[in-house]
Image: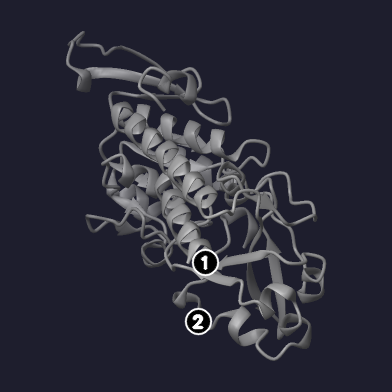
Amino acid sequence: MRRLPTALAVTAAAALALAGCGTTEPAADNSSSPSARSITLTDATGEKVKLDGPAKKVVGTEWDVVEDLVSLGVDPVGVADVKGYTAWDTSAPLTNSPKDIGTRGEPSTDTVAALAPDLIVATTDLKPAVVEQLKKIAPVLEIQSADASDQIGRMEKNLGLIAEATGTTAKAEELKKGFDAKIAEGRKALADAGLAGRKVAFGDAYVVSNQVSIRPYTKGSLIGTVNEKLGLRNAWTVKGDEKYGLATTDVEGLTGLGDVQFAYIGNKADGSDPFTVGLAKNPVWKGLPFVKKDNVHRLSDGIWMFGGPKAMEAYVDALVDALTK
């Protein structure tokens, strides 16, 4: 299922802090040209990553990484599961024709090597053995895949790290300001509609052995954190995992939510919708207060729930539109 993160299926001035000890130093030719200055970064694993200059030919092994690159104005030469990215992250559409390097969990090292990249950007979800293989091809910059204690801070730190590696810190500042502005705009719109403090439960669902499993996005999830920034309250009481803030329940687990707004994201690329098909005749589902009141909102396809600032801006727009109709 494409909706699963791999582990589960910035201001210009602050960019150095966000990137975690990034430095630049003159290259061997001592040229003052920015492209001739080497860059040393410390990635999420504590590894030092040295580049001869801002990376231009970049490979991304995860969709949030690709979104950040495209948002920063860097067209990746290689992308894991191009078809999946195109379906699930329309907030930052590919403007070039990158090579598909294989799956997000198992990229083809031969394909990556043929691209002769300056830099490979991966997440800490990628298996260490795969990372070691990729390091034989080009420098690998690993970013933190998720952190339920501070998802927005992690998102912005990742953006800053990638921006420094690609010489795009000014664009990162612009993206951060745009995200902050979107949060403020959405918060005001919800408050003006009398929805401040409203309980919202966001989840998605999948079918296993003809049974619908529901995945709550708790307060530790990226979307849960964004909802709280919008002035909403997370209706889930179950505890999520320490990385993604996700949990697992079934339709009976929804009975404790009460009268809430329920939102979810599906994608036609995944086939039928478990909520409208798998649960359509389920008496428990049909009896839930938010179902009876038609307070179930399927948000737009193409919003990656584990993405970067552009994906979260798209989420804000879609949620605010759904709740204020």
Q: Is residue 139 visible in this depiction of the protein?
A: no
Which residue is most to the top?
30
Snapshot quadrant of residue 46: top right
Q: Which amino acid does label 2 sit on?
A: Gly
61 relative to 178, above or below: below
Closer to the camera in the image, 97 or 160: 160
Q: Name the residue under label 1.
A: 2
Q: Between label 2 and label 1, give the one nearer the viewer.
A: 2
Report the side of 99 relative to 133 (left or right).
left
Q: Which mark is residue 271?
A: 2
Q: What residue type is labelled 1?
A: Arg
109 relative to 249, above or below: above
Residue 165 in the image, given as x and y percentages of width and height:
36, 29
Circles 2 and 1: CB atoms closer than 8 Å: no
Report the side of 108 relative to 132 (left or right).
left
Q: Residue at x 49, y 65 (%)?
A: 322
Q: Residue at x 56, y 80 (%)?
A: 273
